[in-house]
Amino acid sequence: MLESTMGGAQVAVKLTNRFSAFPISIGAAHVAIRASGGAIASGTDRAMTGAYTCNTPLEPDATQRLPRQSMPKPSGDDTLAKLLRPRI
């Protein structure tokens, strides 16, 4: 489950694995502004980086907060989040 909040010029993302009995691995996390449908507005795709190590399993019932990412959000725009599985 992914929970995101936006305020001002930053986005915060929290990942949780509270609904699974098995660890999950996330290869990458991105946030962006939605243009229309599932399309990403040009120039807004941001990789979430920092303390979170991609490919580290998120254990059952665990929560991981990703470092805040700079991303100005115009009023009324929707935010998209994209989680990518690691390559096997």
Image (spheres, rainbow, N blue to C red):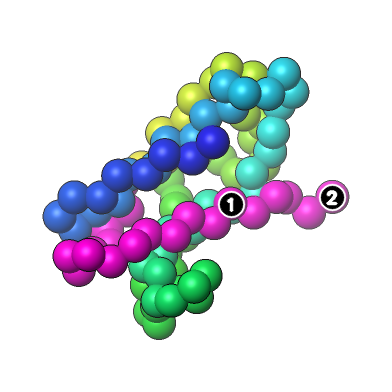
Q: Which residue is mark 2?
A: 88
Residue sitting at 44 percent across and 60 percent down? 80
Is the residue under label 1 in contact with that under label 2 (CB below 8 Å)?
A: no
Query: Does the magenta-highlighted stretch encompass residue 41?
Result: no
Q: Which residue is mark 1?
A: 83
Q: Position of residue 26 (x, y in %)?
A: 64, 44
Q: Position of residue 78 (x, y in %)?
A: 34, 62
Residue sitting at 56 percent across and 40 percent down? 53
Q: Secondary structure at mark 2?
A: loop
Residue sitting at 42 percent across and 39 percent down? 3
The N terminus: image quadrant: top right
What is the quadrant of residue 43 in the picture? bottom left
Work out whether residue 69 can be spotted. Answer: yes
What is the quadrant of residue 42 in the picture? bottom left
Q: Which residues are magenta?
A: 68-88
State the residue lying farthest toward the right: 88
Please, is residue 77 above or below residue 84 in the view? below
Query: What whole-number distance in Å separates the C-alpha atoms at marks 2 and 1?
Result: 15 Å
Work out whether residue 59 can be spotted. Answer: no
Specify whether 62 is left or right of 87: left
